[in-house]
Amino acid sequence: MIKRLIGILVLAAVIITILPVSTAKAVRGAPGSAEFGFGAFIDISGQYVSDGIQLANNLQLDWVNLEIPWKLLQPDKNSKIDWKPVDQTLAGLANYKIAALASITQPPAWALTSAGPDASLTAQFIQQVLQKYGNTVTALELFPAANTRQGWGSNPDPAAYMSLWKAISKSLPAANKQVLLVAGGLVPVVPSKDAQDDLAFLQGMYQAGAATVIQVISLQMHDLIGSPADPPDQKDSRYLRHYEQLREVMLKNKHDKGIVWITDLSAPSDLTQYGESSASFPQKQAAWLSQAFQQIRSQLYIGVAFLDRLNPAANPDAQEEVTSLITQTGDLHPIFRVMRDQVAQNSSGSSDPRPGRPKSDTLIKGH
């Protein structure tokens, strides 16, 4: 514990002298911003939550993503919402003026219909979230992994999702019209009775009118394989550059003004063939993510990428497939230096806020 705290505080002192203080206003990566935004997910039920928030501030992350687990906060329709699970995290983010992306997850059984979450009940819940946390919650992601039964609460249905999305958009209180609604949280999956291909689901969203109302399509990229530079594969969506295939669907539907947020990015679990053979697994994770962030950052249609975690899960078994800046032992993961150096580029004074090679073609095939 002492080692962890001393390490974070020493590094904090160094970082604060390098990076300027930012606020949640005019956040990088939002629609209309030319700059790329960096973010990370914080597990509100995990370990070292307050340290994770402090680390986000020290790194000067633009965004922090957290779940608002509806079922946990309001298990019964007539029960009073228990805000305690999220109070500490959002209070900490508000203190540091860090913009929050709140992902609305886990619709309770009493709020579900055969087609998914009830629009009216969901709108009521979101209005209460914004009334309480509207000064910190800058963006809302509606039911990430919507193309799966686990995320949507029912058989995935892009038309039903868009119907709910439009209802929520219309129901936002006038004072919260500037809250950005982020759509999808699409997960590349093998199609089954409980999951729909993410690109097919996105196409269904467009058929239901997504191109005229949605500004941000979100994509979750975990359980990946290969190197960040590997080209996308028509038969396997687990490569990082799958985002190019998603962008191709967007352009085919004339959604060229829409942008992509990667709201969950973690390194592959198999890195045996990546990097120096003598490197440790955490070092290989850091090297993979360094290349991934540089590559993603050069794509002008991607606004923000969120590292999988700031803090480790409470259950060690749940930590195996993720990359956390603070490890189970309380030390800093090697990815910390990668994030520090990457975020520093946003404050370097460079006239080019998006270094790298942007692609003129949406989908680069055959290489």
Image (cartoon, rainbow, N blue to C red):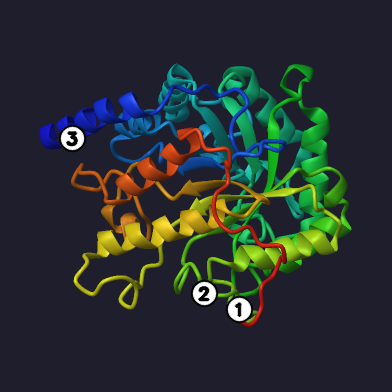
User: Considering the numbered disc 1 on the image, is that residue within a helix, a strand or a loop?
Assistant: loop
Which marked residue is nearer to the observer: mark 2 or mark 1? 2
Quadrant containing the C terminus is: bottom right
How packed mark 1 is, by other alpha carbons closer than 10 Å (few <14, some 14-19, many 20 or more), is some
The alpha-carbon separation of the residues under discs 2 and 1 comes to: 9 Å
The alpha-carbon separation of the residues under discs 1 and 3 comes to: 42 Å
Q: Which mark is residue 7?
A: 3
Residue type, numbered disc 2: Asp
Residue 81, horizontal then vertical, whole percent: 55, 26
Quadrant containing the N terminus is: top left
Which marked residue is nearer to the observer: mark 3 or mark 2? 2
The alpha-carbon separation of the residues under discs 3 and 2 comes to: 36 Å
Residue 83, horizontal then vertical, whole percent: 49, 25
Q: Measured along the vertical axis of the image, is residue 254 above or below residue 122?
A: below
- Who is closer to the viewer here, 231 or 172? 231
The residue beneath circle 2 is: 230
Residue 105, horizontal then vertical, whole percent: 58, 44
State the count of labels.
Answer: 3
User: Considering the numbered disc 3 on the image, is that residue within a helix, a strand or a loop?
Assistant: helix
The residue beneath circle 1 is: 233
Question: Quadrant of residue 142 in the image?
Answer: top right
User: Considering the numbered disc 2 on the image, is that residue within a helix, a strand or a loop?
Assistant: loop
**255 relative to 193 in the view: left or right:** right
Question: Disc 3 vs disc 2: Cβ atoms closer than 8 Å?
Answer: no
Q: Measured along the vertical axis of the image, is residue 179 above or below residue 329?
A: above
Residue type, numbered disc 3: Gly
Q: Measured along the vertical axis of the image, is residue 305 above or below residue 221?
A: above
Residue 246, horizontal then vertical, whole percent: 69, 63
Question: Quadrant of residue 56 in the image?
Answer: top left
Question: Disc 2 vs disc 1: Cβ atoms closer than 8 Å?
Answer: yes
Can residue 335 be seen here? The reply is yes
Residue at (46, 40) in percent of width and height: 345
